[in-house]
Image (cartoon, rainbow, N blue to C red):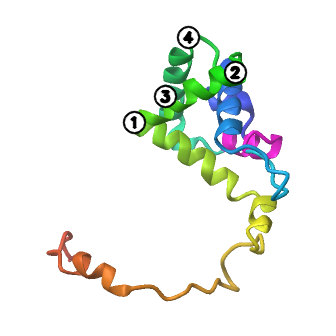
Amino acid sequence: MQSAAETDLSPAQRQDLRALAGLMIPASKEFAVPGADDAAIFDDILRSLGRDRDSVRAALARLAAQAGGSFAALDEAGQDAVAAAFLATNTPDVTILGRVILQCYYRDDRVVRSLGLEPRPPFPKGHTLEQGDWSLLDPVRARPKLWRDAP
């Protein structure tokens, strides 16, 4: 298990990340699900940074700059305004930060259960996938070969 110190995020960055995660995905009493700032989900976010660590750090630095310091220290209206502007930039670092938060949120057992799914690996039981419109893949199939065959 990776400790918070091993994530290379400063305490201020961890606070900003937790505040942003909670703002992006707040808890819902209606659906009985936690927010992305829930302790278990947030710990999973910190443990899951891996290859995205540098991008997350860059995005959090940009968030702090837009907040004029600590994003977590802003009041609710300030956080809403800064987060809206920050997320609207849609840079690769911001996209990666959002993906990290979302992947950890949607693999939490409580969230999976709220979606009416059984929290388990997809195999060996598998999941039923409704058939879709396979013709949507026709443009991909029509492309020329993008690889070379192995000898």
Q: Position of residue 70 (x, y in %)?
A: 64, 15
Q: Position of residue 12 (x, y in %)?
A: 68, 18
Using a 10 Å C-alpha cutoff, classify the residue at mark 3 as few (fewer than 14 neighbours), some (14 to 19) or many (20 or more). few
Q: CA distance from mark 1 to mark 4?
A: 19 Å
Q: Of residues 102 and 11, which is closer to you in this image?
A: 102
Q: Main secondary structure of the magenta part?
A: helix
Label 1: which residue? 91
Number of residues whose C-alpha sits closer than 10 Å to that of mark 4, classed few (under 14), some (14–19) or many (20 or more): few
* Disc on res. 68: 4
The boundaries of the magenta stretch are: 36-47
Asked if residue 13 can be seen in this view, the reply is no
Alpha-carbon span between mark 3 and mark 1: 12 Å
Q: Secondary structure at mark 3?
A: helix
Q: CA distance from mark 3 to mark 2?
A: 15 Å
Q: Residue furthest top?
A: 68
Q: Amino acid at mark 4?
A: Gly
Secondary structure of the residue carrying numbered label 4: loop
Question: 84 and 148: which one is in front?
Answer: 84
- The image's mark for residue 72 is 2
Q: Do tag 2 and tag 1 residues touch (Cβ < 8 Å)?
A: no
Q: Earlier along the polypeptide chain: callout 3 or callout 1?
A: 3
- Which amino acid, mark 2? Ala
User: Can you say whether 138 is above or below 111 in the image?
Assistant: below
Between disc 3 and disc 2, whose residue precedes? Answer: 2
Give residue 69's position: percent from left, percent from top. 60, 11
Image position of 86 with respect to 70: above or below: below
